[in-house]
Image: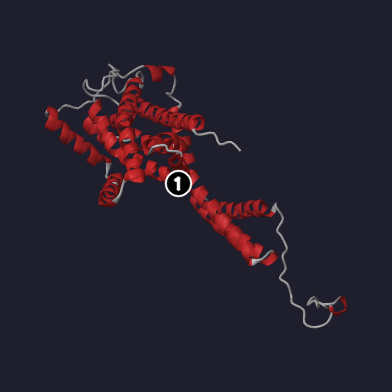
Amino acid sequence: MTTTSNAPSPGAAGKGPQLKRPALTTGTLPRYFPPALLAGVAIVVGGSQFALNAFHPASFAVLLAVGYLVLIGTASTIVENWRKAKDRLVTGVVYCCFAVAIVPLLSLLFTVLVNGMDRFDGYFLTVSMNGVLPSMEAGGVYHAIVGTIAITGFAALISIPVGLMTAIYLVEYGRGRLKQAITFFVDVMTGIPSIVAGLFVVALWMMLFGPGKTNGAAGAIALSVLMIPVVVRSSEEMLKLVPNELREASYALGVPKWLTIVKVVLPTAIAGLTTGIMLALARVIGETAPLVLTAGIAADKISWNLFNGQMMSLPVFIYQQVRMGTDAAYARAWAAALTLILIVMLLFLGARLISRFFAPKLGR
């Protein structure tokens, strides 16, 4: 039996029409070309603006970005190919958007740091404003730190269990119209102005205790109204990311659903849940309007009792000092703003540590 092969013989390799294969490699711009081009465009744009005596940081940044994107796209199209040119162009746009987002943040942090370090010291952090006049250089922010920790902590104590349980219901148990209604109202609550939450708690407090009964507990309840929907939405999305295979494996072993949630679902999503809770805390820790209405603005003594009269917080303290209008008050306001930023940074550091130590260890 004779077999034939369809493969071309070596002698016929040079005969007949040949298919032209696309080139897999093309010219490539050197690695130093993009930064060198960016530096060159910056020199040209900056030099031109200085020569015309029209230098401005905003116009310089816009012209630098446009010039770099046009030139890098053109050079990549000529030397490489259109696909690589599009890649470089989109990469440049991404870097520009990153710069647009990060520059205001860095500018804000730098401004607060420079202005706040004049009064930020151990004395400022350990004394209150009790008996201090607006024009005096004395006084500190300790009573506002205590108020912020107490009010925010009580708000978290209310919001985290309610928000987390609601998210668990929506993901694990919720069905039908009730789930849709809860989701709708949570989305609506996410966008309500903070002043509305303050007015709601003021009206509630007036109905329960009469007019003029402002205290730290009322402020904490107002903050919890703002915090609960953020906790619900972030926790819901984190719980949805847990693979269903983990739940099914637990059910296959005979583990009940509630224990599967506690032992499998929540530990798997602990990192995302912690981040969502910290975002909710950061959302409310800087609120001023609801605390002005509920916790008051005239407190100047150190108090941990949420139910004993007015209680100062860092955002309200900053607002109060700016209203005073003196140089000493402005210095205290900047230092208080720096203190608030440091507290938020410490909260996020604690969240990272919690998510690192309590997240499940994945072995290979």
Under tag 1, what secondary structure? helix
Q: Nearer the viewer, residue 8 or 321?
A: 8
Q: Is residue 321 above or below residue 103?
A: above
Residue 65 as seen in the image, left or right of residue 302: right
Q: Is residue 243 above or below residue 256?
A: below
| Residue under the image location 36 percent in, 44 percent down | 172
Task: Inspect this view and state whether residue 297 appears.
Answer: no
Question: Which residue is disc 1 drawn over?
Answer: 244
| Residue under the image location 54 percent in, 33 percent down | 361
Residue 163 as seen in the image, left or right of residue 349: left
Q: Position of residue 97 (x, y in %)?
A: 50, 52
Q: Nearer the viewer, residue 283 or 352?
A: 352
Task: Inspect this view and state whether residue 12 appears.
Answer: yes
| Residue under the image location 33 percent in, 18 percent down | 128
Total numbered labels: 1
Q: Amino acid at mark 1?
A: Asn
Q: Is residue 232 above or below residue 75?
A: above
Mark 1, other Cα within 10 Å: few <14 / some 14–19 / many ≥20:
few
Q: Nearer the viewer, residue 265 or 314?
A: 265
Please state, as top left, top right, bottom left or bottom right, where the N terminus lies in the image.
bottom right
Q: Nearer the viewer, residue 157 or 151?
A: 157
Picture quarter containing residue 122? top left
The type of colouring in the image is secondary structure
Picture quarter containing residue 236? top left
Residue farthest front in this picture: 1
Q: Position of residue 22 (x, y in %)?
A: 71, 70
Q: Position of residue 75 (x, y in %)?
A: 66, 63
Q: Is residue 343 above or below residue 90?
A: above
Picture quarter containing residue 124? top left
Q: Position of residue 283 (x, y in %)?
A: 36, 38
Please state, as top left, top right, bottom left or bottom right, where the C terminus lies in the image.
top right
Residue farthest right in this picture: 11
